[in-house]
Image (cartoon, rainbow, N blue to C red):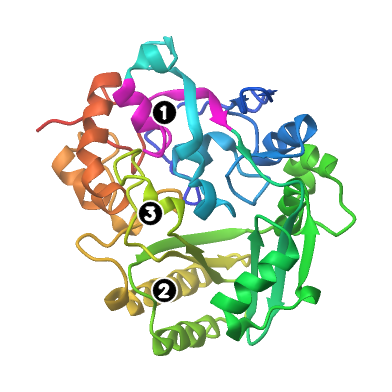
Amino acid sequence: MSYVSTSPSSTQPFLLIDLINLRNVAVDVPSKSAWVQAGAVLGEVYHGIASASGTLAFPAGICPTVGVGGHVSGGGYGMLIRKHGIAADNVLDAQLVDARGRVLDRAAMGEDVFWAIRGGGGNTYGIVVSWKINLVTVPARLTAFTAVRTSEENGLYVGETETLLGVMKQSFPGLELTGQDCREMSWIQSILYFAGYPNNATYDELLDSRSSAPVQFDKVKAKSDYVEAPLPVKVLQGIWKRLYELESGPSFLQIIPHGGMMSRISDSSIPYPHRAGNVYKIQYYAVWSREGKEVEKRYLDWIRRLYEFTTPYVSKNPRGAYVNSRDLDLGRNNLGKITSYRQARIWGEKYYKHNFERLARAKAAIDPSNFFRNEQSVPPFTG
């Protein structure tokens, strides 16, 4: 499933596979790795890791209700992105059920398919039923901060407050960060902090995150961009003005910094290509709860106008996009009919750039009949 529900809006009839009972998390502390079944949500993964070690972590997202399967397969990221890359950068092995019903590990599926499933989009190459993930080492105490100035800023520093204040004073003096803005906590406490849990929440609540996590979205339309040079102040002011055009609904945007480890990993290491040269990623969200076509149209028109406004200031040729923020405005496959590789390039190269052809070749190797498909699944390469 995705923001735009690509999975169940497929051809009729269709098959939807529920992995909810595949939720085991088996942590091996000595090897700093874990086998995670694909039906688990991130909250359950984090709980399993924290129960085994207070100094191991997995660099994935802050929303505990997100399924680990789709998160990893679409290049999901989290607060540790600049230190350790994205979740898919930290996958060591996987178990995949292909269209013929075979259960394949990394060796059996081959390196091209293993490469493809780590960020090449879900519901395309087969059904990943489990991931072997690399766990990264973190200090026992990290520092989270929220600095309310003319707007709200927050972040996570992998270290103690005293060191953070020195770094921020040198690099971001205008933020005027103080010790009162900071809270030292463990990595697992930082997950609760950024997910919006109350201060007295315990990490056991992550086991019930499917029903107890703070609600973040109702109806949503997402779009995304990559920025290669910081946006001018006038553009930020224009974005801010447009955010106030909607008098109701918590529509917002996120700015996700790149650089650091993201710049040191090759843009073809895995399918996620947005590496060196990108300062940050922008994700735009139109969020609403009221029913009705007119309401929906109003929010969709708003986010499309905002996206058009930023066009001159973001990546070009192609204008990059993030596959886990599925955007059918970019193009779609002809479900029920044959979609050519050439046709799919219209949207595919926005997500994957030069990696799209390799993804299509991997698709042709593992699923030549295109059994697994949706509006934006990678079609088999046909030349």
Q: Residue at position x 32%, y 18% from top?
A: 110
Q: How would you rate the neighbour count of disc 2 (Cα within 10 Å): few for under 14, some for 14-19, many for 20 or more?
A: few
Q: Which residues are magenta?
A: 111-134
Q: Secondary structure at mark 2?
A: helix
**Residue that protrudes farthest toward the right in the picture:** 200
Q: Position of residue 211 (x, y in %)?
A: 77, 44
Q: Nearer the viewer, residue 278 or 381?
A: 278
Residue at image position (9%, 33%) is 383
The residue identified by callout 3 is 263
Element class at badge 1:
loop
* C-alpha span from label 2 to label 3: 34 Å
The mark closer to the camera, 2 or 3, is: 3
- Return the residue nearer the eye: 169 or 186: 169
Query: Dot 3: few (<14), some (14–19), or many (≥20) neighbours within 10 Å?
Result: some
Q: Kindly identify which residue carries mark 2.
A: 301
Q: Earlier in the sequence, mark 2 or mark 1?
A: 1
Q: Position of residue 156 (x, y in %)?
A: 65, 60
Q: Residue furthest left?
A: 383
Which residue matches tag 1? 13
Q: Classify residue 244 as left or right of residue 315.
A: right
Q: CA distance from mark 3 to mark 1?
A: 44 Å
Image spot of residue 61 (x, y percent): 59, 49
Q: CA distance from mark 2 to mark 1?
A: 32 Å
Mark 2 or mark 1: which is in front? 2
Amino acid on which the number 1 mark rests in the picture = Pro
**Residue beneath the point at 63% across and 74% down:** 153
The disc labelled 2 sits on which kind of residue?
A: Asp
Give, as a three-letter code, the residue at label 3: Ser
